């Protein structure tokens, strides 16, 4: 199943490999690296890290690591983090001289050698029993990212009405503006596979609270699988998050990402999985594939489009002339036809270049309009007052001819097959533009 490809993508950046189950007990590296970003948390950091460590020791069947990411704290947080790293062998810490939750996660995740990366807020508002269900789909190879959701039906959440309203309103904005389908963008309880993070994180610009949302939106638009876990969550009354500033920054981020997606500025094809990873790419006896599958899909979409077109034409014909009714009905049905064929017939997922595809579809529509309008003009020249049934019969014949031409143009011009040459694997080292990340982690203890 193809994912739309943006032109000019650097092949050296690589594409994602097929998902595989992580082998148990392979190597000395931990399977899971849980990052806890903190800023001035000298009081809560010790008890929370010890509680998390005790939980993982008792319940998690793989090697793990807890990394404390200190966001330029000015209190005794660095000392507390150092003492925890000295006392607990699975704990280490990194010091960053700039604030920002997104910056902290990018820093630690980019340098980590664990195949599954997670993070949670230091207050541990989320019940830790959800941690294993969160990362299990990533370990098994089923999913690419996983998020905790406070808005799922089976979640059990305790928080005030103000935060409840803000959370639901924000997620409604994401659904309306960015067509997000995940339920909870800002729950501080997420995980991602390392191979996905190394390709996805360079596309994420935000370094603050919007980091989560931007990462999820881009992953979803690229067709990656996001697993959601209902959580039990109790609000922290002592939270230091500035709601107004955070909301303002989030809305700015929504605008920036929406604009970038609209103009196709993000090379989301880097995140495409290879053929064979999607079961829809498999050859199954009795299920047509290749050209045959496209013909079946195109005929099905075309039949529905023709029905919609005829209904629209009949409706428009009641108050306008045949040429205007034909043009309006064909325009509306052509937009729907292009969108349906894009997804169902030619298997293009994601919204990149969707506007361009619609523009090309309108060119194809213009050709169809010329054929059908010419047929109506010829019918008018042959008969002064043709019957409505005769008009429909002529239009059906003209549309059949236009349909054959439309399929050929869609296949060869609008949605051509694109062969992606094999790319070298993504280097294991972090991006060269961030040379201090591994040094920070190596010297953090």
Image (cartoon, rainbow, N blue to C red):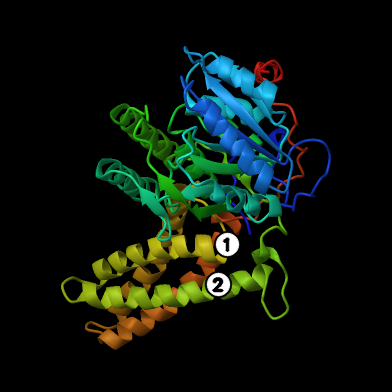
Residue 123 at x, y percent in the picture: 46, 34
The vertical placement of 323 against 216, above or below, is below
10 Å crowding of disc 1: few (<14), some (14-19), many (20+): many
Please tell me whether mark 2 sits on a helix, a strand or a loop.
helix
For residue 301, side relative to residue 170 (left or right):
right
Residue 90 at x, y percent in the picture: 70, 31
Please tell me whether mark 1 sits on a helix, a strand or a loop.
loop
Q: Residue at x 45, y 57 (%)?
A: 361
Q: Residue at x 26, y 78 (%)?
A: 314
Q: Is residue 294 visible?
A: yes
10 Å crowding of disc 2: few (<14), some (14-19), many (20+): some
Residue 318 at x, y percent in the picture: 18, 76
Q: Nearer the viewer, residue 384 or 278?
A: 278
The vertical placement of 443 against 65, above or below, is above
Residue that sits furthest to the left in the current view: 319
Residue 184 at x, y percent in the picture: 42, 48
Q: Residue at x 69, y 50 (%)?
A: 139
Residue that sits furthest to the right in the current view: 27
What residue does disc 1 label? 346
Quarter that holds the C terminus: top right
What residue does disc 2 label? 297
For residue 176, side relative to residue 301 (left or right):
left
Q: Is residue 270 visible?
A: no
What whole-number distance in Å separates the C-alpha atoms at marks 2 and 1?
8 Å
Q: Could you tell me how many numbered marks the image carries?
A: 2
Q: Nearer the viewer, residue 45 or 383?
A: 45
Quarter that holds the N terminus: bottom right
């Amino acid at each position: 199943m193809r994912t739309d490809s943006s032109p000019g993508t650097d092949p050296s950046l690589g594409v994602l490999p097929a998902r595989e189950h992580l082998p148990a007990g392979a190597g000395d590296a931990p399977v899971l690296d849980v990052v806890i970003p903190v800023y001035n948390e000298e009081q809560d950091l010790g008890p929370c890290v010890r509680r998390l460590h005790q939980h993982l020791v008792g319940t998690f069947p793989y090697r793990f690591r807890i990394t404390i990411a200190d966001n330029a704290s000015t209190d005794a947080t660095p000392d507390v983090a150092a003492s925890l790293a000295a006392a607990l062998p699975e704990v280490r810490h990194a010091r960053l001289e700039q604030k920002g939750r997104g910056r902290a996660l990018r820093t630690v995740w980019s340098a980590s050698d664990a195949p599954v990366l997670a993070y949670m807020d230091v207050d541990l508002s989320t019940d830790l029993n959800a941690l294993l269900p969160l990362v299990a789909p990533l370990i098994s190879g089923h999913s690419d990212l996983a998020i905790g959701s406070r808005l799922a039906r089976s979640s059990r959440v305790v928080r005030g009405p103000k935060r409840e309203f803000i959370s639901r309103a924000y997620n409604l904005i994401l659904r309306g503006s960015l067509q997000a389908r995940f339920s909870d963008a800002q729950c501080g309880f997420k995980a991602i596979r390392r191979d996905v993070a190394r390709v996805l994180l360079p596309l994420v610009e935000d370094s603050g609270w919007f980091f989560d949302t931007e990462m999820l939106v881009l992953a979803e638009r690229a067709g990656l699988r996001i697993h959601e876990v209902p959580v039990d969550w109790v609000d922290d009354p002592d939270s230091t998050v500035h709601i107004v500033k955070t909301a303002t920054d989030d809305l700015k981020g929504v605008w920036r990402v929406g604009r970038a997606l609209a103009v196709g500025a993000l090379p989301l094809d880097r995140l495409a999985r290879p053929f064979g990873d999607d079961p829809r790419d498999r050859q199954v006896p009795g299920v047509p594939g290749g050209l045959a599958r496209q013909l079946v899909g195109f005929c099905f979409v075309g039949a529905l489009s023709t029905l919609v077109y005829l209904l629209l034409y009949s409706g428009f014909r009641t108050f306008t002339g045949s040429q205007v009714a034909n043009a309006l009905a064909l325009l509306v049905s052509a937009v729907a036809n292009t969108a349906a064929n894009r997804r169902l017939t030619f298997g293009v997922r994601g919204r990149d270049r969707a506007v361009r595809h619609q523009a090309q579809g309108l060119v194809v529509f213009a050709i169809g309009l010329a054929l059908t309008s010419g047929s109506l003009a010829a019918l008018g020249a042959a008969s002064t007052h043709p019957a409505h049934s005769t008009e429909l019969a002529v239009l059906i014949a003209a549309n059949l001819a236009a349909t054959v031409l439309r399929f050929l143009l869609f296949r060869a011009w609008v949605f051509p097959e694109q062969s992606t040459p094999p790319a070298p694997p993504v280097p294991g080292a972090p991006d060269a533009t961030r040379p201090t990340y591994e040094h920070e982690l190596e010297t953090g203890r």
